[in-house]
Image (spheres, rainbow, N blue to C red):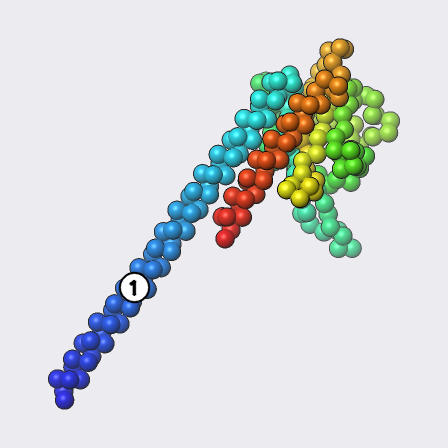
Amino acid sequence: MDKIVDFAQVVGNIIAATVLSIYFAVQYIKKTNAKVKIGKTVVEQTDISLEIYQTMNYYKELLKADRILLFEFHNGQHYSNYRSAIKMSASYEVYRAGLESVLPQCTNLPITIMPRLIKGITTQDYVYCQDIERIKGDMGSCYEFKKGINVHSYFDIALKDKDGFIIGFVAVHWNNPIPPHVHLEEDYKDELFHLSWKLEELIKELTMADKKAKK
């Protein structure tokens, strides 16, 4: 009887050790796969971000612009009455050699500081201005902000998600007077809308990659 009990204990120990080995092996495989998945996602997101920069740089040169910013709307905090504090931040920026980044000035901006600009973008899909001095009287806050980052002319175009909702806009800036024969809407509108379409597609890819990373 003792031998049978001893044999049963040995078998039990073997089974327990096997189960534990299988358990730890499964956990290791899960962790390894997770690391591989995260690694692939990071690479994918980086590749998409590089393509966003390349696209913006291409159009900067094509349009002889000084700077292009990609703004995204977001909800940071809340006001004291619990209304959503909708803000906008520039998540991507390219600029002409010799200039400096203005990203610090373009982060967490309440959309209420430029209501007419945002209304134009969200109702007409774009707004533009040949000479910023023309908006000084009726768009004072927009004038002050853009003047503060040395903008002379601008063309801002809405960016939409897959459902057609506006999620931000791309801002194209010229710091010096553009040639008198150039009219932003007539001469650059097609190129600028192609730029916005390309960026929309890349943002969709970036969003999908981010969702995969969170699963």
Residue situated furthest right in the rendering: 137
Q: Could one spot residue 88 in this view of the protein?
A: no
Q: To which quarter of the image does residue 146 belong?
A: top right
- Pinpoint residue 32: horizontal percent, then vertical percent: 36, 51
Residue carrying label 1: 22
Identity of the residue drawn at 57% across and 22% down:
58
- Pinpoint residue 76: horizontal percent, then vertical percent: 67, 47
- Pinpoint residue 188: horizontal percent, then vertical percent: 70, 20
Identity of the residue drawn at 73% across and 11% down:
179
- Pinpoint residue 180: horizontal percent, then vertical percent: 76, 10
Q: To which quarter of the image does residue 88 belong?
A: top right
- Relative to 25, residue 179 above or below: above
Q: Is residue 8 left or right of residue 198?
A: left
- Of residue 67 and residue 197, the one placed in the foreground of this image is 197
Residue situated furthest left in the rendering: 3
> Quarter of the image containing the N terminus?
bottom left
- Relative to 41, residue 63 above or below: above
Rate crowding at label 1 as few (under 14), some (14 to 19) or many (20 or more) other CA atoms within 10 Å. few
What secondary structure is found at the residue carrying circle 1? Answer: helix
Q: Is residue 87 left or right of residue 28?
A: right
Identity of the residue drawn at 49% across and 48% down:
213
The residue type indicated by label 1 comes to Ile
